[in-house]
Amino acid sequence: MISTPEPDTELKPLRVLVVDDNVPSAQTLEWTIETYGDEVRSCHDGRTALREAHEFLPEVILLDLAMPGMDGIEVCRQLRKDESLAGVKIIAQTGHAGPEHRRMTAAAGFDLHLVKPVDPHVLADMLHLLRTNPLRRRR
């Protein structure tokens, strides 16, 4: 049986937006993040993600790369152009772990790279890192 990490009850909850066109995957991530004590919303396409980011004002966005229509790379680039979302941390979700994919996501403006299938302990560690040591954006 897979254990779920304990929530960070001592720290302020994060607002997390999950963007994945695979609805069951998005729902699983949403549930997992809720168990950490964070506030979470999900959506399933790039255009909705841009709109939801402005309404919800997340601190962290988990963004799938391979989506129909507007892919995750383009969504990230659009988010990075928006000054009102300058502080948001964006985590790429992808099945690709190679160095060329990590360079591609970093160049597009992603802060972190998370390989699918998502390990709940790795995700918990990433969110804890962002909660306790906010990353500085590369210029």
Image (spheres, rainbow, N blue to C red):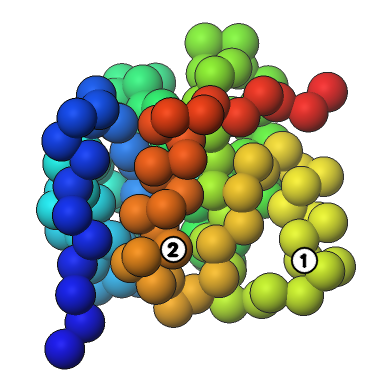
Residue furthest toward the top?
Answer: 84
Q: Nearer the viewer, residue 51 or 88?
A: 88
Residue furthest toward the bottom?
Answer: 1
Q: Nearer the viewer, mark 1 or mark 2?
A: 2
Badge 2 marks a residue whose secondary structure is helix
Residue at 66% in and 76% down: 96
Quarter of the image for the N terminus: give it.
bottom left
Residue 98 screen position, x and y as percent: 77, 75
Q: Nearer the viewer, residue 86 or 4?
A: 4
Q: Would you place residue 80 above or below residue 60 in this image? A: above
Q: Nearer the viewer, residue 70 or 95?
A: 95
Badge 1 marks a residue whose secondary structure is helix
* Residue type, mark 1 in image: His
Residue to which mark 2 is pinned? 122
Residue to which mark 1 is pinned? 101
Residue at 31% in and 21% down: 55
Residue furthest toward the front?
Answer: 10
Residue 46 screen position, x and y as percent: 48, 47
Q: Is residue 5 left or right of residue 112?
A: left
Residue at 54% in and 48% down: 91
Check disc 2: other Cα within 10 Å, few if <14, some if 14-19, many if 20+: few
Q: Earlier in the sequence, mark 1 or mark 2?
A: 1
Residue 42 screen position, x and y as percent: 27, 48
Q: Where on the picture, by quarter, is residue 135?
A: top right
Q: Would you place residue 30 above or below residue 16 in this image? A: below
Quarter of the image for the C terminus: give it.
top right
Check disc 1: other Cα within 10 Å, few if <14, some if 14-19, many if 20+: some
